[in-house]
Image: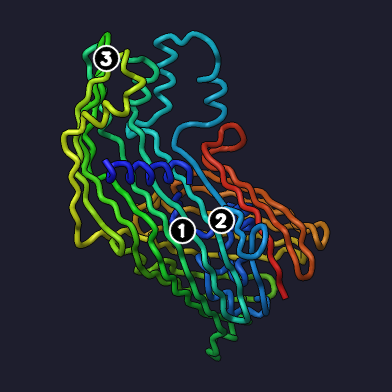
Amino acid sequence: MKKYRYLIVVLFLGLNVRSFAQLYMNPHSVAFANAYSTKARGANVIGWNPANLGLNDNPKFSMSFGAFPFVPIPAFQISNNSISPYWLDNKFFTGKYLTDKDKEDLLGYFPNEGLMLNPLLQMQILGISVGRWAVTIGTEFTGNLVLPKSLFHFAFYGNEFGKAVDLSDLDLEAQSVATIAVAHGRELGIPYLSDYCSQVTAGIAIKTLVGIGYAEFEQVNAQITTFEDKFVLEGDAVAKYGKGGFGMALDMGLSAVINEKMMANISLNNLLGSINWGIIEAEKVEYSYFTEIYSDEFDIADSLFEKGVKKDTSYSINELKSNYPGYLLLGFQYNIFENLNVFTTVKQHFNQDFASTYLPKISFAADFRPLKWLPIRAGIAFGGIEEFQWGIGTGLSFNHYSLDWGFSQIGGMFNNAKGFAFSLGQQITF
């Protein structure tokens, strides 16, 4: 049971914390709906484009932090593929008697593959840049959880006595990682490029990935059957988990200032990114159970469940590797006025792990400053696993200090949204 409970702990982390493939969130990127590739400067270039460190307007020194230096404020994002506040308020929490037709309509909101939850939590412990160099240290929790549609059918209808409810579509992949990244950018001295661009820079970032924990279900066969006086739980599962891991990833980019109005860049992020698990342990778990719980025994259900375990076997495995998903970013910026800039970023993943998708995402954003110290930011995006996203943000921006926040909704607007993101941070620059 020890191994089984470890998997449950990782599942709990996955429920409460994501993954959208390691785009490093900050107040600007959240407000921009990720149209941030050309805007990133200082320590915020990591995960976006390290070449921006070589630009002339990159600060000589910057420090990004949360409440205080080394005391982070978590940035988080969570979404799902079905449920919105509007749906809950107008379809589910109505207080009326639900007919079979009402229940069928409710179930229609859930895809056949089940309810998919994509959570993400990131904490930047240190973000500092000096000249053309930047260093960040942070942690992130990321995962993908699928709850089978049959589970909601059971909740809406109950279950016919003696008829099993299949829960085999349950799926989980989750990992927690600490990242240490070092980036450098510099100007390229290629003479003929000056005929087309006022400045061209290149950059590279090396990320050390320290794995904290990882878990995935390889196979789940489970069902629950109700009777007049009891219910029966039975099934088996095969899972892998690891504690302690190590890996590396690489970011590479180019940035070009075309003229005083336009800028463009391109970056490849998390190249060769993967984590090998097992520094502490890496094991495969095979688990099966069969238990009957009678209506008068619910108060001792946990002990009955343990008695129902038929097989709880784990053994060490030599190789357990997870991906740190890679992606391509294309960015463009146009400065309409001195106080109004517009941005676009295209994001393309290289695989479909951890809520990544081959469907590209294109984001548009604007940064307007009605007052020099008052930024107003907004963005909108289409595609990707989010399908639709919009964001807004503002803050206080002075010569050497800024306080910013960004809020974003995913999969819809206002009460029709199926998720949201939020980030709050401070920055000192010179």
User: Disc 3 marks which residue?
Assistant: 230
User: Disc 1 marks which residue?
Assistant: 22
Camera-side residue of 135 and 295:
295
Q: Position of residue 41 (x, y in %)?
A: 62, 70
Above or below for 60 versus 121: below
Could you say whether the residue bearing mark 1 is in a helix, strand or loop? loop
Cα gap from disc 3 to disc 1, whole angstroms? 45 Å
Above or below for 62 versus 81: below
Camera-side residue of 20 and 302:
302
Please tell me in which quadrant of the rendered image residue 153 appears: top left
Q: Amino acid at mark 2?
A: Asn
Name the mark nearer the viewer: 1 or 2. 1
Could you say whether the residue bearing mark 3 is in a helix, strand or loop? strand
Q: Could you tell me which residue is drawn at 34 percent across and 61 percent down?
A: 244
Q: Position of residue 189 (x, y in %)?
A: 55, 90
Please tell me in which quadrant of the rendered image residue 72 appears: bottom right
Q: Quadrant of the N terminus?
A: top left
Above or below for 257 versus 419: below
Cα gap from disc 2 to disc 3, whole angstroms? 51 Å
Q: Could you tell me which residue is drawn at 51 percent across and 20 percent down?
A: 92
Cα gap from disc 1 to disc 2, whole angstroms? 12 Å
Q: Is residue 64 left or right of residue 273?
A: right
User: Disc 2 marks which residue?
Assistant: 34
